[in-house]
Image (cartoon, grey):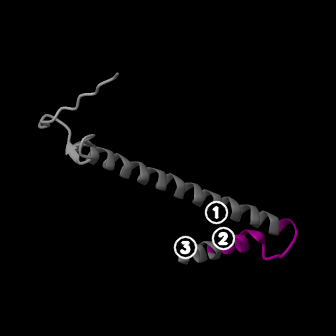
Amino acid sequence: MLGAALGVAALGTVLAAFGGGTEHGPPFLAGLRVALMVGGAVELCGAVVAGLLVRDVLQKEHAASALRPQRRVSPSTDAEEPVGAGSSRRVQLRID
């Protein structure tokens, strides 16, 4: 909520600074255009930062999951057992 209020205040300030203090006409539209461009640029920067942060978090999660042992559900007991070199049970599939 605070970010939205500050964003509206900042864009209103940009509009007033570039709009020439009028409520209508070409100066107002020029100020509105600048305010919208500034708002769009801020949004674009936020999207880039969010994309970089999410990608970094996903890469860390992927690296952490590669280090964890994988688990599978045993068809006979429906219990999870680790998969890997230490597995002692073998599952045989029979196709008739």
Q: Which amino acid does label 2 sit on?
A: Leu
Q: Nearer the viewer, residue 30 or 63?
A: 63
N-terminal of the two: label 3 or label 1? 3
At mark 3, the secondary structure is: helix
Q: In which quarter of the image is the C terminus?
A: top left
Q: Quadrant of residue 5?
A: bottom right
Can you see residue 68? Answer: no
Q: Quadrant of the N terminus?
A: bottom right
Label drawn at residue 3? 3
State whether residue 15 is above or below residue 57.
Answer: below
Can you see residue 65? Answer: yes
Q: In which quarter of the image is residue 77?
A: top left
Q: What residue type is labelled 1?
A: Gly
Residue 34 point in image, percent of width and height: 71, 62
Q: Mark 1 points at which residue?
A: 39
SS assignment for the magenta stretch, majority: helix
Packing grade of label 3 (10 A; few <14, some 14-19, many >=20) is few
N-terminal of the two: label 3 or label 2? 3
At mark 1, the secondary structure is: helix
At mark 2, the secondary structure is: helix
The CA span between labels 3 and 1 is 13 Å
Q: Mark 2 points at which residue?
A: 11
The CA span between labels 3 and 2 is 12 Å
